[in-house]
Image (cartoon, rainbow, N blue to C red):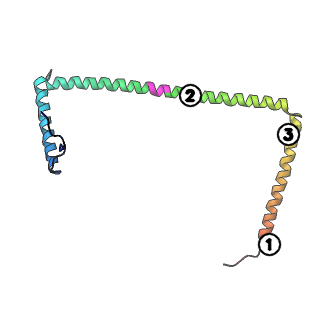
Amino acid sequence: MRTNTDNFDLEAAGGEESRGGLLGLALAALAVGAGTALLFAPAEGARTREAVGERLRDFRGEAESAIGRVQRELHRRDARRRRQQSTSALIGLAVGAGVAALLLPQSGAETRRQLSAKFSRRKGDVEEAVDRVVRESQSEPQSTA
């Protein structure tokens, strides 16, 4: 036996009227579910609610415990990462100081003297540039607004 499926449509033709049918179907399913629960419930409502409540409390306690373990592990990982960063920085500092000591062509005192002289010259250059800008700004004629 063949069935004509060419004009098969899942939606009701009325559009807006189909919402009422959906609500009716939901109410019927609710009634069937409630009736089935009443007929096949293993215990009376109060005992069932108590059992469900105990299971939810147990689940909550297990969830809190799991969250606490995750938080402790995240804290340990963060502390380990910070220790690794500090260790890396100290190793880098030590290696840099060692390489500089080995490759420096003169003593530390001589290097400090040369750096101080360079900074003093640069400071003098900056002071001269500032003085020049101030003199130029004072010598320009002021325009009236």
Q: Is residue 13 left or right of residue 54?
A: left
Q: Which labelled disc corresponds to residue 127?
A: none
Q: Residue furthest bottom?
A: 144
Q: Position of residue 67 (x, y in %)?
A: 41, 27
Q: Residue at x 16, y 47 (%)?
A: 12
Q: What secondary structure is marked by label 3?
A: helix
Residue at label 2?
79
Residue at label 1?
139
Q: Residue at x 85, y 39 (%)?
A: 112
Q: Residue at x 31, y 23 (%)?
A: 58
- Report crowding for label 3: few under 14, some 14 to 19, many 20 or more residues within 10 A (C-alpha): few
Precedes in sequence: disc 3 or disc 1: 3
CA–CA distance in space, label 3 to label 2: 38 Å
**Magenta-drawn segment:** 69-73
Q: Is residue 35 magenta?
A: no
Looking at the figure, which quarter contains the N terminus? top left
Locate residue 113: give its quadrant: top right
Q: Amino acid at mark 3?
A: Arg
123, above or below 145, in the image:
above
Looking at the figure, which quarter contains the C terminus? bottom right
In the image, 26 versus 69, the foreground residue is: 26
Q: Amino acid at mark 2?
A: Ala
CA–CA distance in space, label 2 to label 1: 61 Å
Q: Position of residue 24 (x, y in %)?
A: 12, 42
